[in-house]
Image (cartoon, helix red, strand yellow):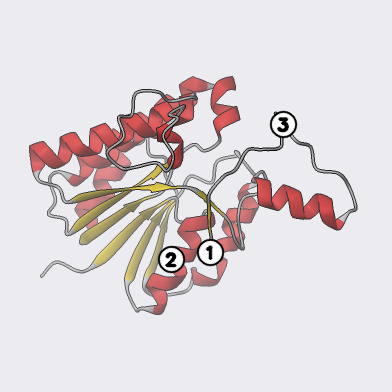
């Protein structure tokens, strides 16, 4: 009988570690994939999950999404029924400096994961997309049916592509996939480079917050 294991990519990160906390509290079997890259301090991510390392329901696999064979081995040796794909190279500005790494991780990595999935029956596959896919559209509020043809960064382009790839695998192989367009999420364990983290740090030190552009911009956030 197939076990009810959850595979969480990027499970040591901000959102992923909170999800892992919740799943383990529900007594679910959880397998985390994380490569602990240096986009920000890897030790922060290790600290996020260190309390789970001795949990019998928790397994950590330190591999990269670009490791196609490694991903396939994980599916072969574990009864995975649900996949939550959170791992990605994040950051709009950083994607402008090094677009190739974003293509490799966010696009090819997602392809590798879906290739590993297609030979194994899944109950669900959740892809963490981004509000950045709406790009430069002037239609407010955003709607899911909006045409995604105006990404404003390489990061956004990789997330648009990820959604299209997910749709293709759903159409061809009947993988049950849902794409979540997350807006700026904040809360405990958020990565240091995020705005809320920076703002609170500067305010606590009595320093001014740099404002880019005019002061009329607004942004939706999730807590």
Nearer to me, 83 or 78 = 83
Q: Is residue 147 visible?
A: yes
**Residue 168 placed where, x, y %?**
17, 34
Answer above or below: position of 4 versus 114. Answer: below
Residue 151 rendering spot, x and y as whole percentages: 43, 25
Q: Which residue is mark 1?
A: 49
Q: Quadrant of residue 208?
A: top right
**Quick one: SS at disc 1?**
helix
Q: Earlier in the sequence, mark 2 or mark 1?
A: 2
Tell me what residue is drawn at x 28 percent, y 41 percent.
Answer: 113
The Cα–Cα distance between marks 3 and 2, rounded to whole angstroms, is 35 Å
Q: CA distance from mark 2 to mark 1?
A: 8 Å
State the CA–CA distance, disc 3 to disc 1.
35 Å
Crowd band around label 3 with a 10 angstrom C-alpha radius: few (<14), some (14–19), many (20+): few
Residue sitting at 12 percent across and 45 percent down?
A: 119
**Percent from the top left, x then y, of residue 19?**
43, 64
Q: Is residue 163 left or right of residue 97?
A: left
Q: Residues within 10 Å of mark 2 (few under 14, many from 20)?
A: many
SS type, badge 2: helix
Q: Which residue is mark 3?
A: 212
Residue at coordinates 47% horizontally, 24% vertically from top-left? 154
Nearer the camera: disc 3 or disc 1: 3
Nearest the camera: 86 or 69?
Answer: 86
What residue is pinned by disc 2?
20
Q: Are marks 2 and 1 in contact (CB under 8 Å)?
A: yes
Q: Earlier in the sequence, mark 3 or mark 1?
A: 1
């Amino acid at each position: 009988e197939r076990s009810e294991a959850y595979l969480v990519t990027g499970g040591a990160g901000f959102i992923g570690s909170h999800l892992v906390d919740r799943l383990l509290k529900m007594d679910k079997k959880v397998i985390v994939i994380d490569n602990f890259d240096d986009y920000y301090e890897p030790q922060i991510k290790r600290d996020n999950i260190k309390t789970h390392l001795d949990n019998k329901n928790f397994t950590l696999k330190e591999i990269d999404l670009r490791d196609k064979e490694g991903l396939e081995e994980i599916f072969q040796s574990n009864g995975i029924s649900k996949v939550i794909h959170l791992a990605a190279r994040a950051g709009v500005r950083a994607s402008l400096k090094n677009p190739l790494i974003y293509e490799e991780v966010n696009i090819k990595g997602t392809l590798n994961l879906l290739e590993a999935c297609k030979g194994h029956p899944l109950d669900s596959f959740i892809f963490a997309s981004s509000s950045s896919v709406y790009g430069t559209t002037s239609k407010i509020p955003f709607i899911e049916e909006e045409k995604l043809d105006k990404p404003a960064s390489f990061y956004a382009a990789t997330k648009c592509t990820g959604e299209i790839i997910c749709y293709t695998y759903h159409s061809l192989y009947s993988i049950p996939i849902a794409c979540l367009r997350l807006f700026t999420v904040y809360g405990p364990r958020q990565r240091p480079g995020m705005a809320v983290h920076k703002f609170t740090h500067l305010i606590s030190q009595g320093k001014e917050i740099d404002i880019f552009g005019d002061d009329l911009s607004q942004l939706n956030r999730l807590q």
